[in-house]
Amino acid sequence: MWTATARHSTKVSNISKDSEVSIGVPAEGDPNGDALAIGTAALHDEAPTDVLEMFNAKYQWYSRPRPDPDVGELLFIETTPHRWVMGSFTTNK
């Protein structure tokens, strides 16, 4: 799982101190709720080309070579899930 964030964000600072993370993932079309990925995060200055192409296809957003106009210089976060928690007690209606 890949995400991008500002290089000087609280998120980057926290991951630098403790690489264990959890990420909420929307369960599109699933009325039983979302999923939670629990895993290990690694910070990268650059993402692989195929990841950048997926960002562009989904969000019409390609981060390189310029800094992002909203947040400045970016870091990419690669999260490797080692546990999934599926569903929630609250439905997505």
Image: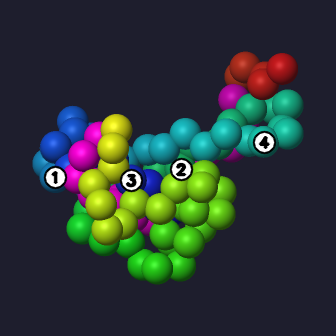
Above or below, 42 relative to 20: below
* Secondary element at tag 3: strand
Tell me the magenta residue range: 71-88
Badge 1 or badge 3: first in the primary sequence: 3
- The residue that mark 4 highlights is 28
Q: Where is residue 30 in the image (x, y as percent from the top left)?
A: 84, 38
Q: Position of residue 81 (x, y in %)?
A: 49, 61
* Secondary element at tag 2: strand
Badge 1 or badge 2: first in the primary sequence: 1
Badge 4 or badge 1: first in the primary sequence: 1
Above or below, 80 relative to 60: below
Alpha carbon separation for disc pair 4 and 1: 31 Å
One can see residue 16 in this view: yes
- The residue that mark 1 highlights is 16
The amino acid pointed to by label 3 is Ala
The amino acid pointed to by label 4 is Glu
The residue shown at (52%, 55%) is: 61
- The residue that mark 2 highlights is 37
* Secondary element at tag 4: loop
- The residue that mark 3 highlights is 4
Badge 4 or badge 2: first in the primary sequence: 4
The residue shown at (67%, 39%) is: 26
